[in-house]
Image: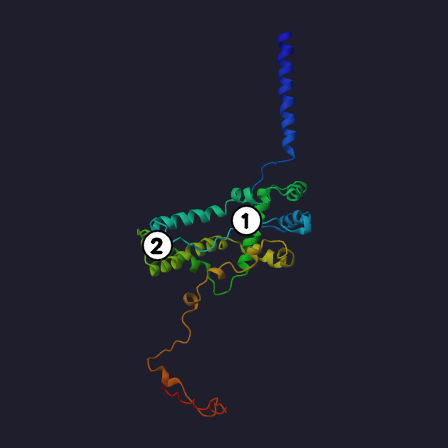
Amino acid sequence: MAKFKLGFLSTLNCLCMVLFLSAGCADDSLEFTELKQVNEKVTEAELKRYLKVIELLPQQKLPAFPSVYAPAPSWSHIRSLPIEDLVHSEQNNLSLLWDVNRIGDQFGLRNRSLKKALRRRDMSKEQFICYTLALGLAASRNQLREDQDLEEVIEKGNKTIHQLKLDKRPFSSLSLEERHRTLHEAMWISRVNRAEHLIQVPPENMNLVRAHWDELQKVLPPEFLKNPLDELSDILEERGIPFTFPEDDADELLHWTSTNAIIGNDEPDPEPEQTRIQ
């Protein structure tokens, strides 16, 4: 009987401890819920829920959101790794930028207002991050120009990247001109990374963002409010060299008439006096 009582008390203590720990963790974590992917449709209800979290934040502003759009590669001239290894390393680093756990480790880490707002709206930080990415990418894609074809960017960029991966020369061994050309081609790594994420955005999300643009442009991270490819653009490469002529004797196409000429009326400057050399 004594053994039974001891066993019962031990079990009861364990249950109490579990309940205590569960209660202690309830304020800091939520039950697991599926995270929204960038290629999935965001509903009106989900958008309203997202905005309700932001309404509870000071000045209805997000804490600084970690950037997911990496700049073009900028390898130091003393980097001794082969170009192929630098390309692989760059691609790996870019993929990490989009990792939700990585973003969560930097986003609102000590922001009590954000934690409180998420708790009140029954949303995990990971969910909030995924909504921000899904809506932000939709906003970014809405900023693209009609002539910026994402499929074309990816196809052209992957060809250039493939050639870079075949280059086994140490970057530090290149001449100044070769380094400049290599970095110019390596810009495609960032372009393709952005395009591969932008192309996943469903049209429903783009329409949703357009319909609620007045609200979203006030709360989304700034990098999602501008054209994501323009800062990586190459004007000469995209639009060609201006003022080209179809024929070798193109100067014959130029016609001069006195009626169209601009003729000055100013008096010519007086000839300077010659300096005598003694």
Task: Inspect the image, locate mark 2, and give the three-letter code of the amino acid beneath it.
Answer: Leu
Q: Position of residue 206 (x, y in %)?
A: 56, 57
Q: Position of residue 199 (x, y in %)?
A: 48, 55
> In the picture shown, does residue 206 fall above or below 13?
below
Secondary structure at badge 1 equals loop
Image quadrant containing the C terminus: bottom left
At horizontal 43% and vertical 46% (from top left) the residue drawn is 92
> In the picture shown, does residue 209 fall above or below 92?
below
**Mark 2 → mark 1, Cα distance in angstroms:** 29 Å
Q: Which residue is mark 1?
A: 66
Q: Which residue is mark 2?
A: 164
Task: Inspect the image, locate mark 1, and give the three-letter code of the amino acid beneath it.
Answer: Pro
> In the picture shown, does residue 68 fall above or below 262?
above
Q: Residues within 10 Å of mark 1 (few under 14, many from 20)?
A: some
Q: Position of residue 257 (x, y in %)?
A: 44, 91
At horizontal 68% and vertical 51% (from top left) the residue drawn is 59
Left-right relation of 40 to 270: right
Q: Residues within 10 Å of mark 2 (few under 14, many from 20)?
A: many
At horizontal 62% and vertical 55% (from top left) the residue drawn is 216
* Tag 2 near tag 1, CB within 8 Å: no
What mark, if any, has residue 58 been given in the picture? Answer: none
Q: Nearer the viewer, residue 208 or 70?
A: 70
